[in-house]
Amino acid sequence: MSERPQCQYHARAATLVALALLAVAFASPARGQSARPPQPAASRVVAEVGGKKITVADVEDELAAARQRDAAQNRLDAFTTAAKESALNRIVSVKLLALGAADRKLDAEPDVRRRLDNVIDESLAVVLGAQLAATIPISPDALRKYYDDHLPLFSDPGRARARHIVVATEAEAAELARQLHGGADFAALASEHNIDSTKASGGELGWISRGVMVPTFEQAVFGLKPGEVSSVVQTSFGFHIVQVEEVEPARPRPFEQSSEIVKQRILQDALDNLQAQLRAKYQVRIDQSVLASIVR
């Protein structure tokens, strides 16, 4: 019954720049300070592979990427004393394979050129996003004002604790609904009849937040008061009857718990404004018939 929440921004480039913008922005110098100028040491050559230079900056970039990956996986490999050598070895491997590809003239193939052009575009987008982030002052007062002015954006959407009975046919669901409204035990019927994995728990679904279930099911859940039982609800999973046990209404999250999200929203607003300006300057044309023909 769950659906992945619809992303507000569908364009891949927008998402890419947004993520880069946020990641780089939060690692930037304090707001109000100028960005640190490039250090000469960053351009020092650590190694050469077939004439291709690998600089301190290259190794630092590879280390930063590895540490980000490791942090997401609760690993520490990229934080050890051997991490620099590992990062350099990965870069050397890539350079060697790139040279091998050039030997085979792969860089002249149209599909490879297309991919290279896309990599360049994505890299430029990341740099522009980072530069944009560095220009936006985010003081505690600015964060608080944005939070106060956009309070609905920083509210928990509300949730309900519920259980359900799901069966394959509408006729069976209607009969079970009749029994429930006649006083039958909901959990007992769910344990007997459910066709999904909640059968073992008497239909227990736990806490359900707004915005994560298919619309028809969500409407049924949040249209009930504690203790009430729904009429039959159809989804692609079958025919459901829902019972709500507890409801928590939407409520604002405290500012102290929202400050990082507020930063993201401020930066995302700036990104949206920049993209709107660029769309006005550069025409975007989409051939819907070609888009519809893509089957993969």
Image (cartoon, rainbow, N blue to C red):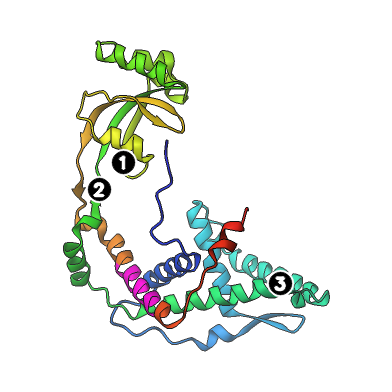
For label 3, the residue is: 112
The one nearer the camera, 83 or 22, is 22
Q: Which residues are magenta?
A: 266-277
Residue 107 among those drawn in magenta: no
Nearest the viewer among 234 and 209 is: 234
Q: Amino acid at mark 1?
A: Ser
The kind of residue tagged 2 is Asp
Q: Is residue 156 above or below residue 261?
A: above
- For the residues labelled 1 and 2, the Cα–Cα distance comes to 9 Å
Question: Residue drawn 49% across and 51% down?
Answer: 74
Q: Residues within 10 Å of mark 1 (few under 14, many from 20)?
A: some
Circles 1 and 2: CB atoms closer than 8 Å: yes
What residue is pinned by disc 1? 209
Magenta-drawn stretch, dominant element (helix, strand or loop): helix
Lower position in the chain sequence, tag 1 or tag 2: 2
Residue occupying the far front of the picture: 289
Residue at position x 43%, y 87% from top?
37
Q: Name the residue: 41% across, 25% down.
A: 239
Could you say where residue 184 lies in the image, as x and y percent from the top left? 29, 10
Q: Would you identify the image quadrant in which residue 35 lies?
A: bottom left
Q: Is residue 55 above or below residue 91?
A: below
